[in-house]
Image (cartoon, rainbow, N blue to C red):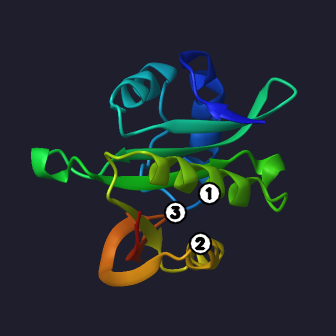
Amino acid sequence: MIRHATRDDIPMMTDIYNYVVERNSATYDIETKTVEQRTKWFGSHKENNPILVYEIDNKVMGYAGLSPFGSDDGYVYSVKLCIYLHPEARGEGIGTELMEEIISLARSMNNIHTIVSEITATNLASIAIHESFGFNYVGMLKEVGYKFDEFHDMLFYQLMV
């Protein structure tokens, strides 16, 4: 079941996020986050920054969020997409369902104009799912991410909603 995230979901979402922090470059956080830090992150989501969770048997198996694109007021209609999955949820279609739902939600809102995704160039699965949902490749920044003792290129994909 996909539903809006609540504060009660923060511990499970933190576990999912920290698993990614420790194992791959889908995020460039280096240190794991505490529940308190992720509670602050959760609280930074405004009216046009929903977070959805995919729940099975009262366990969060993944989440998708639309975060503020930038801190300046002029970015208010632009959002950044993230999707993170529990390791047991990978390859089960949960990411696709979350992507479909978060895009549908964004399209239903009159305060979102565009969704932007930053994707590590080697993350072929993320690139494929974004392209399958109509995101357009709009550019690359060379070697801007550093994790696991190497530099990574970042690709930018955008969907106008």
Q: Distance between the residues labelled 1 and 2?
A: 8 Å
Residue 116's spot in the image, x, y percent? Answer: 38, 64
Q: How far apart are marks 3 and 1 (CA)?
A: 19 Å
Image quadrant containing the N terminus:
top right
Q: Earlier in the sequence, mark 2 or mark 3?
A: 3
| 82 versus 150 height, above or below | above
Secondary structure at badge 1 equals helix
Secondary structure at badge 2 equals loop
- Identify the amino acid type marked 1: Met
Residue 145's spot in the image, x, y percent? Answer: 36, 68
* Residue nearer the viewer, 8 or 149: 8
Secondary structure at badge 3 equals loop
Residue 82's spot in the image, x, y percent? Answer: 50, 53
User: Which mark identifies residue 109?
Assistant: none
- Identify the amino acid type marked 3: Ser
- Residue underneath mark 2: 133
- Residue underneath mark 1: 99
Proximity of marks 1 and 2: CB atoms separated by less than 8 Å: yes
Residue under the image location 35 percent in, 47 percent down: 110
Residue 43's spot in the image, x, y percent? Answer: 37, 24
